Structures are given as C-alpha cells and as structure tokens.
Image (cartoon, rainbow, N blue to C red):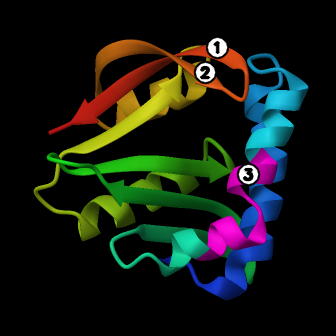
Amino acid sequence: MIQVRKATINDILGIQQVAHITWHSAYERIMRPDTRAQVLAEFYNEESLKRSLERKETLFLVAEEQDRIVGFVQALPRPLSGYEITRIYILPQWQRIGVGSQLYAALAEQLPDQTLWSIVQRDNQAAIAFFQKHGFVQQRQLELPLFGENLTFVELAKQ
C-alpha cells in the first residue's frame, strides 16, 4: 500500500534513484542525453536536494511502498501567486495506477486556496495529460534554454 509523507534528508538516495530512472524514461525522445545528464547532476545531487528539503516554504512529499520510494512531488511558493509544482516523478512501473494522483492530492490538501502552477516540456504529453486530468489549464507556451538546449514548455495553472 502506498504511503505519502513529507520527505526528509534520509530520502535523498531514494529520490535520486527515482529521478534518474524517470528523467531518462520521460525525456529520452525529448531532450539530448547531455542535457538530461546535466539536469540530474545539477538539481538532483545530494547538496541540491538537501537545500530543497531544508527550505521551510517548500513542500516536498514522497510516495513509498514497503520503505521504497516510488515517487515524489515538490512545490515552491511562486512570487505573487500560489505555488509551482517543480517536480513530480513516479517510477515507470508505478505510473498510471494512482500514485501520482495520491501525491498530487496530498500536496493540494496542504495548499488549500492556492493557485497551483507547473511548467512542463511541451512534448511530455503524459505530464500534460496528468495535470489536465487534475484541472490544470494551459496558460501559455514559452521557450527556455536548458544547459544549451532550447526547449519549448507550456505553463499550466489551476485556480
């Protein structure tokens, strides 16, 4: 049975494992291998995750099954308006069975009356469909450079 709880420093290795598997799975046909590797090295190294987990205003949750992390979600306050879901990743074998929805529901429950945002790579149709299923609506499309690769993203929001 999946348990959703607040992430701790002790979860860093499990978060890293989920990130490495899901980033390659989700972005294999979307981003260059060197871009994926740089994102993982920059944003999923131990120090970076530790800083994220220690930020008081950050909400970082993990989903676990029998003490194994199978997914995670992070939201940060967005200047002037609500919170941005900056990370939500689920191991491929745990996708499409409700784990992401459980994580999202736990996050939304802790952020009542907040506008929620997410910026998703345009070609990541599974992620866009997930957010739309949960009531998010596309706001705009934007081009952003990511470690030397220009990528198109969509910004989604739920009031």
Any part of residue 125 in sight: yes
Query: Is 157 placed above or below 115 here?
Result: above
Q: Indicate the position of residue 97 as horizontal and vertical percent values.
A: 60, 48
Q: Indicate the position of residue 35 as horizontal and vertical percent values.
A: 80, 30
Give the CA distance from mark 2 to mark 1.
Answer: 4 Å
Q: Amino acid at mark 1?
A: Asn
The furthest residue to the right: 33
Q: Secondary structure at mark 3?
A: helix
The reply to whether the C-beta atoms of the residues labelled 2 and 1 are less than 8 Å apart is: yes
| Among numbered discs 1 and 3, the one appearing first in the sequence | 3
Which residue is at a point 81% across and 51% down the rendered structure image? 41
Give the labeled residue for mark 2.
145
Say whether residue 122 is left or right of residue 76. right
Q: Amino acid at mark 2?
A: Pro
Give the labeled residue for mark 1.
150
Q: Quadrant of residue 56?
A: bottom left
Q: How many residues crowd around disc 1 within 10 Å: few (fewer than 14), some, or many (20 or more)?
A: few
Which residue is at a point 56% across and 56% down the rendered structure image? 99
The reply to whether the C-beta atoms of the residues labelled 1 and 3 are less than 8 Å apart is: no
| Among numbered discs 2 and 1, the one appearing first in the sequence | 2
Query: Is 6 placed above or below 32 here?
Result: below
Q: Secondary structure at mark 1?
A: strand
Which residue is at a point 72% across and 75% down the rendered structure image? 12
Give the labeled residue for mark 3.
42
